């Protein structure tokens, strides 16, 4: 029993360090080997100690990366509230604000918390270039041939292989290649609605989805959404008889970060099946999980072929490639026809590059590194917000992806704050961008997929000060 | 005067050879140097003789390629008729037929007169590959950066330079890059109409335009169209008060081949300006002229910024690149926004490749070769049709591009003929594909941008026999 006592003793020491904040939220524990030397015990004893801490939710392990203080039991800041959605009579589409924020995308010297794309240092640029060269060398037609309207067959095959999470439920024949996930969503909406129809969305909602809905002459119905559980199914149930489609980001939601629990996904699929309402499931963040395995999409539970499962490489590999896809279930033929009429086909090059990258087994390795970096950044930004922002700041608890959602004091207008921050070369996405009802005006979304430099840290400190000063 | 007499003598000999059909329509005259030896005269005398023949419209010169028998004064076959358009009550969209014909695109051993794309041997594959390699080498971001929604700035600059025909009326700022010309047309239609609106189109009309119109919930109004002069302006005038847009292929029309005369273009622009109706001008064949210079588009005469000028490299360089553009006049901002919502931006690679190709001055050289080959093929196919098809065959007289339109005996159903031809590995586009009113059932479109082999020649002979046998 000496050994048992020993590992519990070490666990107790570390627990006290965490409680006294000697070890803080997000800190990395010493490596197993360092700790072994530090405590002068066997490697196994240290392992047992760390596992004990993990079982108490005090630390989290990241495979190949180490153990981090997670301290969920002593979370300092509250979760954002689920708000009552304003009536649709009060529409104020946030186009002006979106234009303003994205007008600064190419601004050179800005700390970009506003964008929904990962920073350069997260992307495998050198390996992508290798794949580009491979493709050019092997392209006898110099790219002049038309692709099938459904999309590059090799890419579809690789993507179907990669959809392990569906446990073999789709093949290359079930997929359609699109120009990124937004293009897939646009095609899905177009396939299952006609102008004037209504579409249920989360609230807060990714503004790109709102824009697509409005462009097609549709109405968005915002549904209250919980920062941990996702869409409120009771609220959804009430509007189901009046809508033509649902469009949700079910895993590592943008902007809320939640991973909809499996039971909720099952229940959602049951509901849409009952009402025969198609669900556009935007699952483009699904591979960026912090947990131990990729979460299932609703598509996994879909027996009626009503779920249109959307993905892309824009968030994980290459935003500029515009390579996305959809498994559109029963609406496949309609979507292929739409694509044929609108663009004839996709250009082949980046489809080939992604195929080459996947065929060389580079995606798995890249994703593992990427997830570890993202999780580390997530812990950093949580800690920074807890340290620098006012105590009444409410903050989301993303289970993956790279978006943090903050709800500030009611007196704060993040649109005004945006101007102030911008003058100090800091950019973020103000909350009003994420609703059509002039809501979330005291909220903001922060992208944490950026290289974590001293400047990033100090910019968050500055942002915190601005907020404190404006109350 | 001895010299004068000599060149007229030679001209007389050749004229007699043409009249006796020793030299036939489409034949190439001996080169200047060969003829000099043949007739044992000076080079200048031969030049004068050929110019004399040209002035009598018996031959046509193709710079750097030689002189060809054109014999327009003795044209054997009549022009296709301008038909009265059936009432819109009788709609029968040709989707079934389009699917059938294009379902065979990748059929290996087919002589493809059906496609609207040039054969491989017409495309500068090696030089495109050079540009591809250049682009990969210089791409520091490995293509991961997002492009501006308006499109690659370098490509827009090159395209604006290339739009010499507009005499400086557009700059890179006036252009939006799209995923091919069809995508540009789709965006233009979307920008200036709402579901239920009507759009005027030529009849026969390129089926892609009909499909886009129907996909957007619009109605197509087919206007009678002359095989030499294009759209009938009087008929158009009558419907102008009832339509929301016009969509015409003004130069080397698909399928009729006409180049709308300048006076008609001016009159058309005057009409649409008077009624304030946008004109989508699909000018993607404009650089493939048989004459001495590139024809002006309507855009050149457009003072009100109502003409949306569409182009692409799909017909001249690389169908698979899906690189097109539009100068959308007053609708530019709307189109950029639509593109942003639907696809975020275009992928950069093929835009860069085309830019590199243009920057190296390769386009001009390529187009000159391409036009010469096309003209030579045009003469070949005219001759083949005159030789092998029944005498009552009516045939268009394209002034550029690579489409020939045939009107056969009223008793011929080209849809039935298609099946018979297909069984003999010959494909063409049956006329019904080019109208929504179950018309042109005795017509067909032939693509002549294919390598002119003995098999092509003998397949046209076979096709002629099938037609003769089915009357």
Image (cartoon, coloured by chain):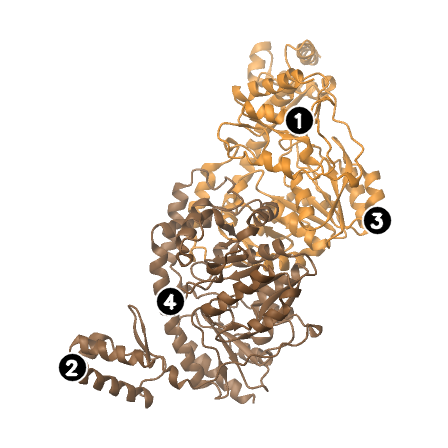
Chain colours: A orange, B brown
- The answer to whether the residues at label 4 and label 2 have Cβ atoms under 8 Å apart is no
Give A98 or B259, whichever is nearer the viewer.
Answer: B259
Q: Name the residue under label 3.
A: A241
Instruction: Determine which of the numbered discs, if any, sits on residue B371 in the image.
Output: 4
* Residue A334, placed above or below residue B101: above
* Among numbered discs 4 and 2, the one appearing first in the sequence: 2
Question: Rounded to the nearest whole Å, what is the CA distance between mark 4 and mark 1?
Answer: 60 Å
Residue A376 in view here:
no
Disc 1 packing (10 Å; few <14; some 14–19; many ≥20): many
> Between tags 1 and 3, which lies in front?
1
* Residue A130, placed above or below residue B181: above
SS of the residue under disc 2: helix
Q: Mark 1 points at which residue?
A: A414
Q: Which residue is drawn at 74% across and 21% down?
A: A78
- The answer to whether the residues at label 1 and label 3 have Cβ atoms under 8 Å apart is no
Q: Where is residue B448 in the image (x, y as percent from the top left)?
A: 44, 72
Q: Which residue is drawn at 67% across and 18% down?
A: A470
Residue B71 in view here:
yes
Question: Rounded to the nearest whole Å, what is the CA distance between mark 4 and mark 2?
Answer: 34 Å
Disc 3 packing (10 Å; few <14; some 14–19; many ≥20): few
Residues indicated by labels 2 and 3 sit on the same polypeptide chain: no
Disc 2 packing (10 Å; few <14; some 14–19; many ≥20): few
Q: Name the side, left or right, on which B53 lies relative to A351.
A: left
Question: Rounded to the nearest whole Å, what is the CA distance between mark 1 and mark 3?
Answer: 36 Å
Instruction: Determine which of the numbered discs, if any, sits on residue B3 in the image.
Output: 2
Q: Where is residue B286 in the image (x, y as percent from the top left)?
A: 44, 63
Quarter residue B292 falls in: bottom left
Residues indicated by labels 4 and 1 sit on the same polypeptide chain: no
Q: Position of residue A56 (x, y in %)?
A: 73, 19
């Amino acid at each position: 029993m000496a050994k048992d006592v020993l590992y519990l003793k070490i666990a107790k020491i570390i627990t006290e360090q965490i409680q006294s904040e000697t070890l803080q939220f997000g800190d990395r524990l010493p490596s197993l080997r360092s700790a072994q030397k530090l405590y002068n015990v066997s490697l196994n004893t240290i392992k047992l100690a760390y596992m004990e801490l993990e079982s108490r939710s005090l630390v989290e392990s990241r495979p190949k990366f180490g153990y981090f203080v997670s301290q969920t039991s002593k979370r300092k800041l509250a979760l954002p509230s689920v708000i009552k959605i304003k009536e649709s009579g009060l529409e104020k589409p946030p186009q002006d604000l979106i234009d303003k924020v994205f007008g600064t995308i190419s601004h050179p010297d800005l700390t970009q918390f506003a964008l929904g794309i990962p920073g350069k240092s997260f992307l495998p640029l050198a390996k992508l270039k290798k794949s580009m060269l491979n493709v050019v060398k092997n392209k006898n037609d110099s790219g002049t041939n038309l692709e099938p309207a459904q999309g590059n067959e090799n890419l579809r095959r690789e993507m179907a292989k990669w959809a392990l999470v569906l446990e073999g439920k789709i093949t290359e024949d079930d997929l359609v290649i699109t120009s990124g996930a937004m293009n897939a969503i646009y095609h899905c909406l177009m396939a299952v609605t006609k102008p004037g129809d209504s579409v249920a969305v989360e609230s807060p909602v990714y503004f790109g989805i709102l824009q697509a809905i409005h462009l097609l002459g549709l109405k968005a119905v915002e549904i209250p959404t919980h920062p941990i559980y996702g869409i409120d199914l009771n609220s959804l149930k009430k509007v189901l008889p009046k809508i033509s489609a649902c469009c949700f980001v079910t895993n590592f939601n943008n902007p809320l970060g939640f991973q909809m629990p499996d039971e909720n996904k099952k229940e959602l699929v049951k509901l849409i099946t009952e009402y025969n309402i198609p669900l556009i499931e935007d699952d483009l963040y699904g591979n960026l999980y912090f947990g131990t395995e990729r979460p299932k999409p609703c598509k996994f539970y879909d027996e009626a072929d009503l779920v249109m499962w959307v993905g892309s490489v824009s968030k994980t590999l290459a935003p500029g490639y515009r390579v996305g896809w959809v498994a559109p279930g029963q609406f496949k033929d309609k979507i292929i026809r739409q694509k044929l009429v609108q663009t004839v086909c996709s250009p082949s090059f980046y489809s080939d590059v992604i195929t080459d990258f996947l065929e060389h087994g580079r995606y798995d390795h890249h994703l593992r590194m990427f997830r570890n970096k993202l999780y580390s950044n997530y812990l950093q930004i949580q800690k920074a917000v807890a340290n620098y922002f006012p105590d009444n700041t409410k903050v989301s608890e993303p289970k993956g992806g790279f978006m943090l959602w903050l709800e500030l004091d009611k007196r704060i207008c993040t649109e005004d704050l945006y101007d102030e921050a911008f003058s100090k070369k800091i950019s973020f996405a103000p909350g009003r961008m994420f609703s059509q009802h002039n809501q979330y005006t005291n909220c903001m979304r922060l992208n944490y997929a950026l290289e974590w430099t001293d400047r990033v840290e100090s910019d968050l400190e500055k942002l915190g000060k601005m907020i404190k000063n404006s109350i």
